[in-house]
Image (cartoon, helix red, strand yellow):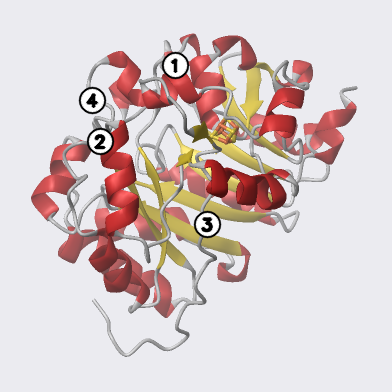
Amino acid sequence: MNHILNNAERCGLFTGTYGRSRCTANCLGCYIGESDTYDSKYQGKVDQVHELMSILPNLKEAVIMGNPDPSVDPVFCNETAKILQTRDIRTLFITSGVGGLEMIKRITDGLDPALIRGIGFSVHSLDEKKDALMKGLKAPLLQGIFQSINYLKSLNINVQVLFTIWPMNMDDDWTEYFDFFESRGVAVGNGFGSIEAANGRIDHVPLGKIIEIRKRHKDARLPTVLANDDEYQKYLTTFVAEKKFKCTNLKRIDVCFTDGEIKATYSCSLVGTVYPEYFGNIQEYNLNKFHENTLNTGYCPIHKQALGFEVGSLHPVCRFYKQLPKKPLLKNPTLSF
Ligand code: SF4
């Protein structure tokens, strides 16, 4: 028995191995499919959901990513959530929004809204054409994602929008983006594009641009990514001291239903993408060899691959570190979509 698994409370769940090539969207910045795990077309089984619950007896929350998006297998994602809810396990879903309101109704059908912790939609730009360019197809905002958000809010289900900064949207007005969604009671999550650039479909965001974007949108809650000496000191005494890394947090795990076994990796998907040897049978899940160094220095172990350049005199901090605190969301926003 692997005792580490007894402590896991949260998991990200890929419900099969369709990978990027068989997804409903064709996102340029997608990392799924870059490892052997996604080289076969496999859809998970109900038995594996039960097996997962017995392997992770203390699971409290599952982020259902689908196969690799809930819009690929909405019926199975819904069935999975229903099984998890029988044990009071909360669920979240992350989706590109392809399939619109119909898909959202399908994944939430018959679920207890109180046990849905939220649904996240990727919206990479308020410019629909740019968002479509990044997803490889149009997932309409007004008649699709915004309509779905209105529906979910009417059920009191939390909603989040997520954007990733890549060269094609790096000059967007991120301050405006935050204002647009937060003034409508929708939380915003975000990050700078990372290792997905390594496969050549998309370019890395250059160093100078990361610094410029952060400076231009200093009131927007963007990740630091590269810290100067002062920022690094603050990072060490906060984020690092509190051990907030996903890649070292053994209470969190990412899993994937594959043909014949359940595979697992660290809750930061970047690690299992850069180092496929860290994406193996769930029973072999254990500490990684850079665990201690990351906890001591706070340096991201995959920063070179994620950035695509040397950091020079700056410090490559965890890509999830943000200096600004989360803003409380308006309970009854006057604006709507
Ligand atoms: S330090 Fe790097 S690998 Fe670890 S959680 Fe942060 S981004 Fe992921």
Q: Which structural element holds mark 1? A: helix
Q: How many marks?
A: 4
**Residue at label 2?**
25
Name which residue type carries label 1.
Tyr
Mark 3: which amino acid? Gln
Q: Quadrant of the N terminus?
A: top right
Residue 305: quadrant of the picture: top left
Kindly state the secondary structure of the residue where label 2 is placed. Answer: loop
**What's the mark number on residue 323?**
3
Q: Quadrant of ligand 1?
A: top right
Q: CA distance from mark 3 to mark 1?
A: 35 Å
| Cα gap from disc 2 to disc 1, whole angstroms | 16 Å
Label of residue 211 in the image:
none
In the image, 199: left or right of 113?
A: left
According to the picture, the residue beneath numbered tag 4 turns out to be 203
Q: Amino acid at mark 2?
A: Ala
- Looking at the image, residue 115 lies above or below residue 78: below
